[in-house]
Amino acid sequence: MTQAVLLINTNIARPPVSPVGLEYVGEALIEGGVAVHVLDLSFETNWKAAVQRALEDGEPLLVGLSVRNTDDCSFASRKSFLPWISDVVTEVRRLTEAPVFLGGGGFSTMPEAVLQATQADGGVEGDGEAALLALAKCLAKGEDFVRLPNMVYWRNADVMRNPRVDVDLRNLPTPHRRTFDNKRYEEFGAMVGIETKRGCSQKCIFCADPLAKGNKVRLRPPQTIVQEAQGLIDQGVSWLHLCDSEFNLPVEHAKDVCRAIIQGGIGKKISWYCYCSPIPFDQELASLMKVAGCAGINFGVDSLCDEQLDRLGRVHSSSDVHHLVSLLRSQGLNYMFDLMIGGPGETAETARLTINRVKQLDVPLVGIATGVRVYAHTPLAKAIADGSIKGGLHPDKRQAAHEPLFYLSPQLGSHAPALIDELTAGDSRFLALAAPAEKGSYNYADDDVLCQLIERGARGAYWDIIRRNLGG
């Protein structure tokens, strides 16, 4: 195979986010005997000139573009990233006749809508390692790829989706993590991502993770994770993010990962952050995480009203969260909570109950998303479609399928953000998922204040940098 696959990281948000998924795919291609060139637009000042340079060395076999997120998930700003992806597709097409394919978590969440919005030639839904390798081999042989699993493509004017096959992560080789410049990402303030698993079997009514990564949890061997981390350490990387849906699901695997990190002797060489579910979370896990180098945990608590948690499809209770906070304090673990205000059935009273209980728990940092992003094929979207949930859509008028759609409980009234401001007034620990430039926002995309803190040497999870800055 003489032609190379060109992989382009399209995520140009500041502060930057390392392209872990695209790197995994690139290394799988190389392992399979396919030449790979990469273009990282995150570090380019003139992206069009960079694309032109990348295509001057010869016609690629195909061009793969990453779609990490389709929008910023903020009810306040509702910024879609798909017009930008469309611009990149158009520019690439102007310079080459090679097919342009999309992939990544954002694409896999809503593949038909993204393909229609960007007019790319096709995409890979779900795991990309085996799928993109199979696609490259088909194209090299001049064979038709439309029967390959995970392919999304055009047939006349319609978007077709082939059956999806998830890879067995145990069979993938240990990534070398040298396709992208991970040390440079750390120098610009990013944490470098590592997966310990894929998929989520939780039943949260709003979450797109089961759509993007599957609803069955697939585990990576702990020793493979340690080997990957050691490779990054050898490159000078020390700040890591375990980018799983929930690190502690299942809890025994999380403990095994921590034990492997400790036994591998790298727990003191790295600082890492993760997302966790409030349950299961016990003292043994907390202790292992701390010894293994965990620097902070983001808990998706959503609410501290039990009735509201039930409506959201969550399995933890407010008493579980009280127990969690006591455990975190006893172990001295750093953490934050994420709340979601405005789901089905939310009222001013349930919102007040949640915020008052968080205050009583003295949580060090709390992010509040007002309004729920509605993704097609989630339980929330299905309930809206069948009329089980009425009203509350924003915008309420018909729009294109790819444009961000939100639900906000009508029972909260028309001034929900003002209500949240009133309930959290004067308490700087509460941050809103608002526009990046807005004071008290934790919308990280293009946040100037956060970028300035990083330029002055701050490192860690972006929420933790904000927390430390609040402390003076």
Image: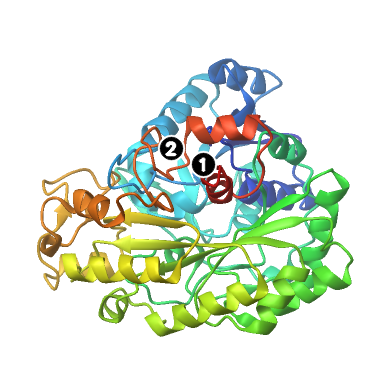
Q: Amino acid at mark 1?
A: Phe
Disc sitting over residue 316 in the figure: none
**Left or right: 366 as drawn, with respect to 130:** left
Q: Is residue 297 above or below residue 4?
A: below
Q: Is residue 312 above or below residue 211?
A: below
**Left or right: 234 as drawn, with respect to 112:** right
Q: Secondary structure at mark 1?
A: strand
Residue closest to the eye, 163 or 381: 381
Q: Secondary structure at mark 2?
A: loop
On the image, the x and y values in percent for residue 2 come to 76, 35
Q: Is residue 10 above or below residue 278?
A: above
Query: Which residue, given by chain and number where applicable, does mark 1 sit on?
Result: 101
Viewer can see residue 51: yes
- N-terminal of the pair, mark 1 or mark 2, is 1
Instruction: Give me the residue at 50% from left, 60% from top.
Output: 364
Viewer can see residue 40: no
Q: Is residue 51 above or below residue 225?
A: above
Instruction: Give me the residue at 31% from left, 55% from top.
Output: 424
**Left or right: 153 as drawn, with respect to 332:** left
**Left or right: 442 as drawn, with respect to 169:** left
Q: Quadrant of the C terminus?
A: top right
Instruction: Give me the residue at 81% from left, 68% from top.
Output: 261
Query: Which residue, given by chain and number where applicable, does mark 2 sit on?
Result: 120
